[in-house]
Structure formats: C-alpha cells, structure tokens
Amino acid sequence: MRRWQQEARETRAALDAAWSELPPALRLPTQFLGRHYAGCGATIGAMPRCDFSCRACYLGPDANAAPPLPLSDVKAQMRVLREWLGPAGNLQLTDGEITLRKDAELIELIAYARSIGLVPMLMTHGETFRRRPGLLERLVLEGGLSEVCFHVDSTMRGRRDHYAQAHSEAELMGLRAEFAELVRAVRRRTGRRLDAASTMTVTQDNLAEVPAVLRWFLANADAFKMISFQPIAMVGRSATGLAGVSVEDLWQRIADGAGDRELARGTGYLGHPGCSRFVQGVAVRRGDRASLVPLYRDDEAHDMALLGELLARVGGVSLRLDSAVRAALRVTQLALRHGVFFARRFAPYLWRLARRAGTWRGHYFCVVSHHFMSADELATPLGQERLASCSFRVAIDGRLQPMCAVNAKGLRDAFYRAA
C-alpha cells in the first residue's frame, strides 16, 4: 500500500508539472497531457545503425558509422526520462534499428526500463524477428517486453523477399498479416501480455491507401491496438521527391477508413494539436466491414462530463507494469474508492457506448496521427509554439530535448558525432 501511495504522489507531481507548462489555450476538454500522461520519451544512441535504406528516414548521414552507446549511458537516459514521466511512463526503445543490438543487451535494457518504472515499447521494422524466429518470444519471457511497434509502409527499402520492392500499401498487407500472427503466436506460447502497434509514413503517394490500411487494422484489432499515421517530414535522409500531406487531408482519409464521417468528434490530444491527435475507440464489425466507434464525442455532453470526471479521479493510473495479482488488487482498491461513481456514471456510459456500437463485442483501438516538423517548419512562429509544448522528448547530456529539435536542428547528428 505504501508503494502505491508513493507512486500516486509521483504520478500526480509529473502530471501537475506537465499541465502547468501547457499554455491555457491548449488545456482543452480532450487534452490528455497533464491529465493522464506526462509525455512520451525515447532513447537515442542505443543503436544508431540500421540495415534498411528507407526513402523516408529521420536518421542523418553519420548514423551507420556511430557506435551504440554503452548500456550504462542508455540507462542514464532512462533515469532522466523516468524522473520526467513518472511511474509507468511511456518509453520508446528506439534509435536506428534497435534489434541489431546483441540479444542479451536488448533484454537487459528492456528489463531495466521496467525495473525503474518505465513501460518500454520496442520500435522496429520487424525484419529481425522474421529472420530470427523466437527472438520476440525471448524478449517477452526474459526481458518482460509487453509492447512492440512495427513500422511498415511502402517508403521502406531493405527487406529481402517479395516485399523488397513494394510500391503500394496493398502489396504489404501480407506482411502486416504476418506480424499480426507473430503477435498472436507469442501470446499463445508465452501466456504473457503483448500489446502491438504499428506506424506508417504517409506521403502523397500512399495517402489514398490510408482508408484500406486502417480498415485492415480494425479487422485485426485483436492483434494490434494502435496505428500511428505519420506524414513525412523532410529531415535526415528523406528523399526530396516525396511530398507531404496536410492534417486535414489525412484525417479525412482516416474517417473514411473508420466508417465515420464525424470521427473528428472523438479527437483527443497529447500536447499541441498541430503535433499529434488521436481517436480512441472500439473496433467493431458492421456487416462485412470493421469500423471504429469513438469512446467519446465532443458534441455529447454526457461523454464530456464523464471524461472530465474520469480523468480527475483516475488520471495517470496504469496497470501496465502490474502482475495479474497486483492489477486485481489495484482494481479492487479503485472500485472501493470510486464505487459510487462507477455504478452511477460509468455503467450508464457503457450502455450508451454499446448502443452506439450496436454490439457489446469489440476491441479497444486507437488511431493516431503524429506530425514531425522540418527545419523550415521549426523556424516559423507556429513551429516555435509547437516546440515549446513538445510532449515527445529524448535525454541528451541529462537535458530533455524535443524530438523535432533532435531531428531537424541537427542535435541527432551532433550527438552521433560526439559518441
């Protein structure tokens, strides 16, 4: 109990700090920064090298020549991020291609992150798991990995089979299905929790395929819980011939794929609306198609009132590092403390949500857009405003740096050269 009380104090301090730094204009009813999350952190230098040569890449020309940092240095970054993010903070274990690090070292990094109270999500192109069957299972069993994210899109180059020269997202659906089955199989074999997500770079060339990609993920929401669409930013080694897309054009396509023209009514934010936005929902089957039903709508007064009270009562609470027994005890504690609220307010909400969905059966799913900036965008007043409210940071020399500054202002390349 004392440990939970200490975690609760740390969580509240981290959330309050994040909220206090948000400009009043960004303290929106569906703002989650400072109310449920303090932000998101990422490693740098853990493995700069990548064995792909993608046409959309934030890595600079020096990445493949830079040696990976010693484990002690990466762990030091994690401790800085833990102090900022609080208990169960989101950590992206990433850099170039992190799975090229030695197995034992990767396992040690995953286990260390969890031991200090961070939830590591391993970011990967996934090819190492295809070439080395059993590796993902080892990371789960020996390191405690519980979250993995596969980057798959048609700008990528480096696969060695019939996906090597894929020029459309349709050509990659089989690969996505392979990763979905890998996740399901690891869960079956280990009996452990493994949440999976995916990222996809979006350009003018594949924008029209966003609806089909999203429909595929909704149909496979038992395996994947999230997809993040990321419009290309001209940073690093990104090819100059690739054209970016606007937020509005992207979300119109996302709404088409979700089967809901008013999907934006369910938009949430983690920081500046120009940086990222998301819709949390339930993936359900409607006839022969899957669709996304938002968990809340901003034009539903009941939803907004419930969301505000829910975040005020249990914002920041996470079960992702808990064992089954500890999670059950924590849920019991929450039920005892907030039982009247859950009975009087939350139960009717679930009934309304089920009526909107047309079923009680479905899987949680979150669709995200994340918009990195180029150097030109950073130089604008809006770019500076976004930078000041950044919720995605890395630790360089003990200081938290916005990811867009790392990618577009040369901080990544300078870090690699100094390594």
Image: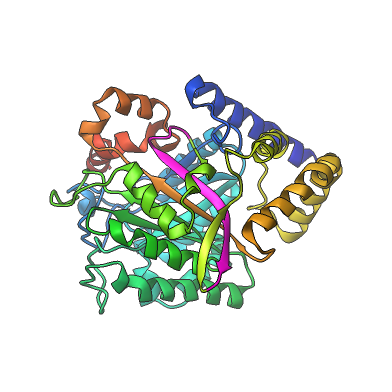
The answer to if 380 sits in the magenta stretch is: no
Locate the N terminus and report the quarter of the image it occupies: top right
Res 69 seen here? no
Which residue occupies 55% across, 72% down? 287
Q: How many marks?
A: 0
- x then y, percent, for residue 159: 26, 71
Which residue occupies 58% across, 64% down? 284
The answer to if 283 sits in the magenta stretch is: yes
Locate the C terminus and report the quarter of the image it occupies: top left
- x then y, percent, for residue 258: 47, 58
Relative to residue 219, is residue 245 drawn left or right?
A: left
Relative to residue 222, is residue 101 drawn left or right?
A: left
Res 320 seen here? yes
> Which region of the structure is painted magenta?
271-287
Residue 362: quadrant of the picture: bottom right
- x then y, percent, for residue 351: 74, 54
